[in-house]
Image (cartoon, helix red, strand yellow):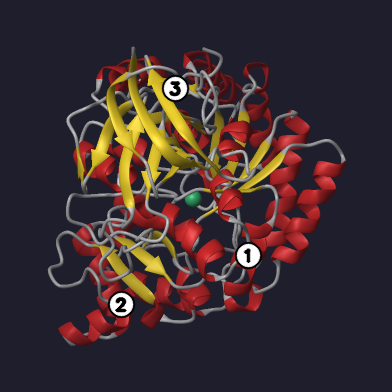
Amino acid sequence: MLDLIIRNVQITDGSGRASYIGDVGVSDGKIVLAPQGAAKEEIDGTGKVLCPGFIDSHSHMDRMLGSLDELAQLARLSQGVTTEVTAQCGSSVFPAAMSAKAWFDMVDALPKGGNYAALVGLGSVRRAVMDCRDGVPTEEEMEKMKAYVRDGMEEGCFGVSSGLIYIPGVYSTTEELIELTKEAKPYGGVYATHMRSESDHLVEAVEEAIKIAETAGVPLVISHHKAVGLSNSGKSVETLRLVHEAIGRGMSVTMDQYPYEATSSTLTNSIAPWYFTDGYAHLTERLKDPAFRAEVKAEIESGNLSYNNGVRNAGGWDRVLIASAEHTPGAEGKTVTEYAASVGKDVYEAYFDLLVENGCLKTKAIFFSICEEDIDRIYMDENTVVGSDAVIETAKDHMHPRAFGTFARSICRFHKEKGLVSFEEAVRKQTSLTAERWGLANKGLIRDGYDADLVLLDYDALRDKADYVNPRQLTEGIEKVFVAGKCVFTDGHLTDEKPGRLLRKNR
Ligand SMILES: [Zn+2]
């Protein structure tokens, strides 16, 4: 007797091939195709679509595990995401806060609706050994960092990640990153990177990313690929050319992408990196000093192209939306310009006050700075998969809508609205292609014996509702979501089932 049969449903199996009508069974958490006999539970799937659970190639939800569990899981499961690849952009909880083993043990023990995979954050590794120091590591520091990478890979990480605009990742040289990434190679690990530039030096940044992965001999994932800043519009022509050249030499290169025209980061992302050498807390202190403010302001306004300047890329403070500012009532959801006007301050005074009152690390913003034409071009590339870059800082913050909306939005924007790809291809880019590139075994396809992570949806009703004003609205049209055959989301809410697992590579 099977546990479940979904009958007479349109099966879009994740492979990209044409959908067909059939029955899908579940037994012991695994998919049974063309099931015979009866099941404990039957669902009539007439008029509905069954897809593999969506796989998020890029997520920061590992940081919410153990604190904002219910909210984090609602954000993901309500849009059909059943597995997410976390600890991206150089940032993992280990080894600074605890060892990799302690983190894996902790997450194993937590009740989880969905599945998680993790990477070793190279920024976190550097911070654990060198704190926020600029400059190259000593030989001894390098050995310590390598040992931390191996620890994470031993536990079952799927690769390493770097975040080269963040502190301290911004101080890592290409050579350092190659040496650390080599440690992941024996385990089949991937190098994923939030590159050194996504704007003025985007092309050079892609060259560096390719060089690191190619020299280390591992597959490359370019995180949330995009061109930022109006003057960089169209640069994806060149970045995709470089990607295909590398693939021609035998490399594996994947890009992930979220389907939005705005980025999300710390509000400090406009301030030059050399002001961060003593850490975020120290910068917060210094920003109380008017003379220092004048210096930082002059640098932001200088047109210096050597670093990632968020407000310049967006084209002004009226295109920077305050997303998270816990201690400043009334700021969240306003642009910096709007907020300054509302409190009767000069825009820079308001900006610096926000950072001082909320702390440089905790103040988050949304920058409307992604070039539109590049979004479609990147999505259409056969090596691009969908990744949300989801992060939720607090239970109440005004987050980027990608946390709740990415997966329906990709289907709606590129397939339903623009007709750039078939429905089957849109689904493939968020299921089997993602599983294949990350090496997630038994995921991403509706195939006999695969994990029964499934999404039952209403194609006509499918619509992302999360937007910049209301970023937590649930996607419409997602009817039921299953993880390991258990229903984790139905009728707009989570169930009590917690069948999710922390995945371990090679196990
Ligand atoms: Zn990133």
Q: Secondary structure at mark 3?
A: loop
Task: Relative to 345, say whether 443 is above or below.
Answer: above
Q: Which residue is mark 2?
A: 336
Q: Residue furthest right?
A: 249
The span from disc 1 to disc 2 (Cα, nearest Å) is 35 Å
| Residue 251 percent location from the top left of the image | 78, 37
Dot 3 or dot 1, earlier in sequence:
1
Contact (Cβ within 8 Å) of mark 3 with mark 1: no
Q: Which residue is mark 1?
A: 420
What's the amino acid at mark 1? Answer: Leu
Q: Quadrant of the N terminus?
A: top left
Q: Secondary structure at mark 1?
A: loop
Q: Which residue is mark 3?
A: 503
Is the residue at mark 2 in contact range of ligand 1, meaning its CB lies under 8 Å from it? no
Drawn side of residue 78 relative to residue 265, left or right: left
**Which numbered disc, 2 or 3, marks the residue closer to the eye?**
3
Task: Relative to 476, say whether 291 is above or below.
Answer: below
Is the residue at mark 3 in contact range of ligand 1, meaning its CB lies under 8 Å from it? no
Which one is nearer the viewer's eye here, 25 or 118? 25
The span from disc 2 to disc 3 (Cα, nearest Å) is 41 Å
Residue displayed at 69% across by 55% down = 381
The image quarter in which residue 50 lies: top left
* Residue 225 visible somewhere in the drawing: yes
* Residue 93 visible somewhere in the drawing: no
What's the amino acid at mark 3? Answer: Leu
**Which numbered disc, 1 or 2, marks the residue closer to the eye?**
1
Residue displayed at 44% across by 29% down = 24
| Residue 486 percent location from the top left of the image | 29, 26
| Residue 249 percent location from the top left of the image | 87, 39
Residue displayed at 67% across by 16% down = 186
The span from disc 3 to disc 1 (Cα, nearest Å) is 33 Å
